[in-house]
Image (cartoon, helix red, strand yellow):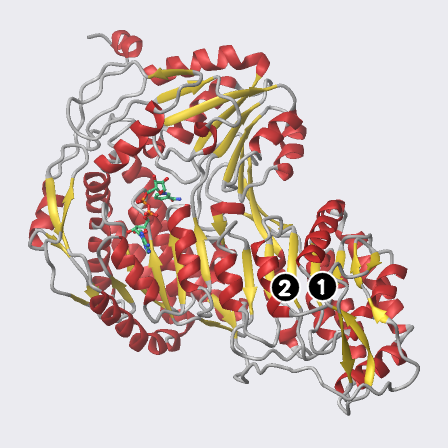
Amino acid sequence: MTIKDIFDTMEYGPAPESAKEALAWIEGRGGLAGPFVDGQWGAARADIDIRNPATGERLAGLTKCTPDEVDAAVKAARKAQPGWWALGGHGRARILYAIARMMQKQSRLLAVIESLDNGKPIRESRDIDVPLAIRHFYHHAGLAQLLESEQPGMEPHGVAGQIIPWNFPLLMLAWKIAPALAAGNTVVLKPAEYTTLSAQVFAELCRQAGVPPGVVNIVTGDGETGQALVAAEVDKIAFTGSTEVGRRIRQATAGRGIPLTLELGGKSPYIVFEDADIDSAVEGLVDAIWFNQGQVCCAGSRLLVQEGIAEEFHARLKRRMDGLRIGDPLDKCVDVGAIVDPVQLETITRLVDGNMEGETYRANVPLPATGCFYPPTLITGLSPAAPLMQEEIFGPVLVSTTFRTPSEAVELANNTRYGLAATLWSENVNLALDVAPKLKAGVVWVNGTNMFDAAAPFGGVRESGFGREGGWEGLGAYLRPVRGAAKLTPVAAFTGDGAPAGPLDRTAKLYIGGKQARPDGGYSRPVHGPKGALLGHASLANRKDVRNAVEAAHAAKGWSRTTGHLRAQILYYLAENLSARVGEFAARIDALTGAGGAVEVEASIRRLFTWAAWADKVDGQAKGVPLRGLALALREPVGVIGMLCPDEAPLLGLISTIAPAIAMGNRVVAVASEAFPLAGTDLYQVLDTSDVPGGVVNILTGSHAELAPVLADHLDVDAVWSFSSTDLSAGIERRSAGNLKRSWVNDTRARDWHGPEGEGRAFIEAATEVKTVWVPYGE
Ligand code: NAI
């Protein structure tokens, strides 16, 4: 065979990597994978078989850890946590660095074990999974080192329970463990049942790297072990996997005061404009949908190609598909390896075989006679509503449709319940940067795809979950501000005998869409002062009023596109108009609560200034990633936020929650202090005179306990915050699982609204989503 023949046919011989060392390593562990707790290997059993998906051969036996074994791991982690935090940032940095070094030394073993266990081509595990995992530990060694100086006043949650999927076993482990440890938490991690082996090697490397016992604990098993970990006494849960399980975990942790991050599924659009470099875009698709056999949560699985080039594009794509080499994952020449397990192969087959629409093209390439293999597949001509355009297939199957205009592309791209990632190909930078902000996705790649780095935040919006992994933004999920220990206590409304305190106010209405509105139900309640005097009546909002307010908030979506400068000006103007009425508001608060009015109004004005100041300063970060480009971590508003405002500080609490939300470009439906609602209703006129557009701030009064579930159930509400003095977290968190809306609910500790806890970064985090836009930049 001549070199020309090789180039023409792309036929070349196999170049298999040896599995000898990896198999010997497994043998050295007695052919069993099991728990690693408190720095020791626990008793291992062969409860489940671990198989090589490329051959079907049994690799090892897997221990299915029982709830008792999981609890033991959590106890070990709890015992180790104070010491780990006390080591300080530098102490933890040294150990994270040591882990990275150990992984580097054993990178070949890790890559081979990963490919044996998962079926991914060795080219990927060797050149992508393992190096990225190592980079994660290096990067987080640095974050640990800088933590105290960069983020003073923060502390770890304690013990993090972490559950990961099978598609990137080692990389997902690194994404979970590195930030948790850097922030001073200890961890109990459960790998997926199909792919546990690289975590076993990692546990051994932790021992060698000098990780103190109990800091890293691994429990093995399937979904039941995962459930036991969710039920155990952990202080934080981080999960990556299917949307369905993510939803169940949201429900299971509801009301337990456990912060949760969920990285779930996707159906990410891959948009090719007609001015794109077509060959690059075709090559990009190989990385988008055939990387890791398409078993990638952010896979570019939905091709949207502009009509004028569709035919040519599909033709070139099919030619490229026919050039892919499928086979033994340990062969260094193989592009596409095995599907992780027969169960997953069946799922893919069922989904594709069930489709009756469009045309299905399977790559014209030989498949191995045995093992879990599925050919690269392209399905064209599907309608946007076709099940395969909407459902995550999680396999090497690309679905495709066409569009005519950029706005149609945006509409199709956003026509999904998910929002993990999106890819754009165009040689026109104006077009690409015009479209990128319009895409509902946590990550956008311009003229590239499936790029990841430890410094670049990754995560989704909508039903793709919440929270970010990577960079300072990801580290934030493992930290919380140091808070006072005072318990949150319910604040009850005063009661009285009905005698008016003076000339009686009329019943305060609701404030919806910039207008005062009578409550739908027509009910109100008397509001009494501390000595029983009747101060007025407050409307009792119901479900219909919430719906109207949410609708008004949606109609005001232009607010999210205003500039930070404009929002700052409006917040300053609010402060100015409030300061013109200091005496009146102070007297009202005194009458409602008994005292402290003047101080509270002054603090409210100050707080409006704080958020006016921030409005044009939350500008994200440009991450210098080690690839040809920049990852811009931009902050976008969350959308419509429903909020139960603090009872105890009726004006300051309302301002402290509304102002950060609108400063960041959100619209709000706020339920004012239940006990002292009239300080909130007095604000309507100030809002009217301050140029706040109608619908940006909607204020309701009524029962927090009745209105919270309505807000949490509402599919057009993107986030719910509760600072009510009643703990409503269980209901809100459980119900928010429906559309996986973000929730920020009171923990059991009281917040001092006058102090630094009443403002700061936590509010910015909750009021924004990070969108990471990767753009080509530099050489
Ligand atoms: P899965 O979500 O069931 O499993 C992920 C992890 O969660 C595993 O470690 C599993 O043992 C654990 N788990 C399962 N049930 C649990 C429960 N009730 N409580 C706690 N932990 C639990 O994903 P699976 O079954 O492996 O794959 C099914 C589908 O999920 C795939 O076809 C794909 O569509 C999607 N998926 C998405 C991933 C992503 O990265 N977004 C990764 C893996 C799967």
Q: Which mark is residue 707?
A: 2
Of the image marks 2 and 1, the number of the one nearer the N terminus: 1
Q: Which mark is residue 541?
A: 1
Q: Position of residue 738 (x, y in %)?
A: 50, 51
Side (left or right) of 648 relative to 502? left
Is 564 situated above or below 319? below
Q: Position of residue 455 (x, y in %)?
A: 48, 51
Mark 2 C-beta to ligand 1 under 8 Å:
no
Is 173 situated above or below 129? below
Side (left or right) of 374 relative to 280? left
Mark 1 C-beta to ligand 1 under 8 Å:
no
SS state under label 1: loop
Q: Confirm or deny contact between disc 2 and disc 1 (CB under 8 A).
A: yes
Name the amino acid, label 2.
Leu
Q: Quadrant of residue 705?
A: bottom right
Side (left or right) of 610 relative to 290? right
Name the amino acid, label 1.
Ala
SS state under label 2: helix
Neighbour tally class for label 1: few under 14, some 14-19, many 20 plus, Cα within 10 Å: many
